[in-house]
Amino acid sequence: MARPGAVIEVDRNTPPTLFHYGEGVRLERLPLGSRIVYPPDPLEPIAHPERAIKRALGKPLDDDPLKSLLRRGMKLTLAFDDLSLPLPPMAAPDVRQLVMEEVIDMAAEAGVEDIHLIAALGLHRRMTQDEVRHIVGDRIFSTFWPDRLYQHDGEDPDENVYIGKTAQGEEVTLNKRAAESDLVIYVNLTLVPMDGGHKSMATGLATYRGIRAHHNVKTLLGSRSYMNPPDSALHHSCIRQGQLIEDTVRVFHIETTVNNHAFPSIASFMQKRETDWTPQDQAMFLAMKQMTDIAPPAFKRGVFHAMRAPYGLTSVNAGQVDAVHDKTLDAVRNQISVPVEGQTDIVTMGVPYLGPYNINAPMNPVLVVCMAAGYLFNLYRGKPVLREGGVLIFEHPCRYEFDAVQHPSYIDFYDEVLADTTDPFEIEKKYEQRFAEDPWFIQLYRKSNAYHGVHPFYAHYWAAFAMQYAGDIIVVGGEREVVHRLGFKAATTLEDALEMAEQTVGRHPSITHLRVPPIMLCDVQ
Amino acid sequence: MTAKPWYSGERGVTQLAGAVGALVNDVQRVRRAWHWDTPRPHTWPELGAVVPPPASDLGWARQEPVRTIRYLIQHGLLLPFTEAMAHPRVEGREWVKELDRPVIFAANHSSHADTSLILHALTDTARDRTVVAAAADYWFKRPLMGNIVSLFLNTFPFSRTGGAQGQLHASSTLLKSGWNLVLFPEGSRSQDGRIHEFKPGVGHLANETRTPVVPVHIRGAQRIMPKGQKLPLPAPARVRIGKPLTPKPGEGSREFTTRVEKAVRTLAETPKSQDLQGTWIERWRASKPRELVYGDD
């Protein structure tokens, strides 16, 4: 049985703690009495994923068996999540591939001629052919690419339709092929509670017009947190949109979850608690530390991004979206929840090399904010681990480094928008529309592998709540100029940062370190 | 004058002089008879193409350890080089993934790069069992080159100038021994990249051996290495593989060849032809991995 997550108090015998530091690692000694929150160990994966998938499709939740929904002459669309999940990308075969192969087998048996497979990108970048192939596998790729397997284009005026408005006035748009289908089967992979459910269709197959209804500062500030759907205004909005989509098209949802076995054996020390490190883990840490200290960033990036996670399937559910998503959330929480008692004055964390938006690219400063103050800070249920007005400290090199192919609009966002202000409301009002409608960014999103022009804004909005809530945010080891541009304070060492934090939270603060990744969800009581 | 035999009793210089004299005499006779230094008589028929002596079928190239060496050469050199030069896009690989019997690959031909592109497009299993028909009068004029090419690409000499029965026999023997055959039925590389008329050999061979023919269309090879160019240049290529065609009962060789030629021409077109490349259901089933069946024992 897998060990549950734990909160350990630092004493004299506690070994130093691992901090991720972008494309690098560090060991830090936390002050005595600090707490370290560790994620649970990976759950035992399902031994026969194919059988579990067959079972789920044969006995769906609140829906008819998939086989009975497929018939000759129908228009069938399979939509699936893009490469932003899971992180790091999963070692082949990806669970989406296994699910889709099963569904396609059934469709072939039923004689469904008209079938399309669409990568539900939303406003994310188009994937490369190899990335698509990695998700769907060789067999699907060679059978369907490129005419029946392709990627959603949220800026193609001919391939998207406006469906209507929700009772709250949120506009809803949908990929035309999906809207005109007799059945849409959505194949999802849920890593954190934020993913999946109605959000899959409402963002993955939508356009800017539909997505802006919930990807805005007001909604995100009203989501406490967006990692806990019942308390998330973002998810409430997606549910309203999703219900309208379900009135338009028949949707069959398939959701999968994986355990948190995020690192291959070569980096298993990242997966383990420091007290569990074997001599091999210690040697591996030393080797990786030396390598990351001296190697140029591009080389380190190559090594890190080549890592594939040996995730194992922990659940697969199919059927009506709400029923399925409830089960999925249970499975996710079962894997990542850690009970944490009370809030704390200071939260520390190490930001890893990878977030959802920088697969095969450097994590630029805007994405560092999104990752640290957005995703990692919001991995809580109930209330944040940090008390209001407390100090968030994270470690990352924060280099002025952008991928011009994937993140062209991020460069302008950093150089032009953040130079003016870091206030999310002001940014939204003053700049968002211009970037979203910029023809060059639209062209790059549609034809190259670039994120949509509006995407850096969303990345910044994810962090809006943390920036408003925390008394101070301090970046350890970051480039001073970049950190200041982001609106944060820079410190050279963790000791300096803790010293600086005392000016905000007072002497003898309580400190909690979140040892992520692997992912966890702090259930703060 | 002829040289005297060893038992004639003459020895030494006398015998040597006799031998040299005989040789000179012979050479002179031949020179005069075949007009070495005067124009070829106009009454003589035109020169025929060079017909090489019946070459060996290069059986050594299809035996171990040569197959292993070729595997290493192909995976270490040929395939990475092809990938780097052409980054070929392969469509329809599922049709050759799990071949349960030998087939003939019939492709258009515009460049020496065609062979590498076809081999690159095949799966490892199919490639390992594939021989390439190479023009005997071109590749095997010089035996050393013929053997080297054979080591790299598993070629066998194929006469373009006749000897249909002999060729048929050699090719059908290969097919019967389980080897797939790559043929370029146009006979020669196209100068302009257009597909020329197919020679009926492919239909004849398929008809006689009841072997399916897989039509293959290669686009872009001409830009990599057009006829007359010595070195390849990088350019994108696409290899499109169609559904295997089988001669219908009563269908003549020429009719079948025409059908194969039409199939290759259709593959060249966009959009894809469902008849030729199959519906997705057919392709999906064709690419189903072979299920391992374990016996009770």
Image: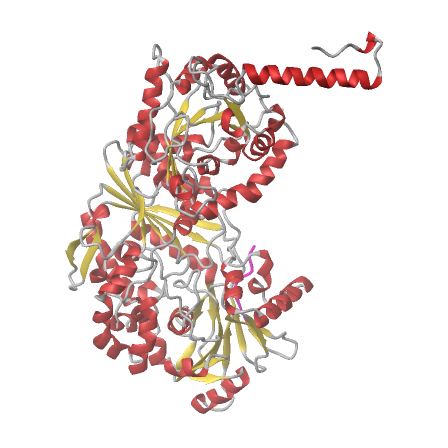
Which residue is rendered at x = 81% and y = 11% of the image?
Answer: B6
B165, above or below A333, in the image: above
Give the image location of residue A33, x and y in percent: 56, 81
Q: Residue farthest to the top?
A: B8
Along the viewing direction, whichever of B140 and B13 lies nearer the viewer: B13
Give the image location of residue A204, x and y in percent: 29, 55
- In the rendered image, residue B256 lying in the magenta stretch gets the answer no
Give the image location of residue A323, x and y in percent: 32, 51
Quadrant of the image containing the N terminus of chain A: bottom right
Which residue is rendered at x = 53% and y = 76% of the image?
Answer: A35
A35, above or below B90, in the image: below
Is A443 left or right of A395, judged from the image as shown? Answer: left
Along the viewing direction, whichever of A237 and B55 lies nearer the viewer: B55
Prevailing secondary structure class for the magenta stretch in the rendered image: loop
- Which segment is the magenta one? A1-7
| Residue A219 visible to an observer of this rendering | yes
Along the viewing direction, whichever of A454 and B209 lies nearer the viewer: B209
Give the image location of residue A324, x and y in percent: 34, 50
A111, above or below A448, in the image: above
Is A133 left or right of A460, judged from the image as shown? Answer: right
Quadrant of the image containing the C terminus of chain A: bottom left
| Residue B135 visible to an observer of this rendering | no
**Count of numbered badges drawn on the protein:** 0
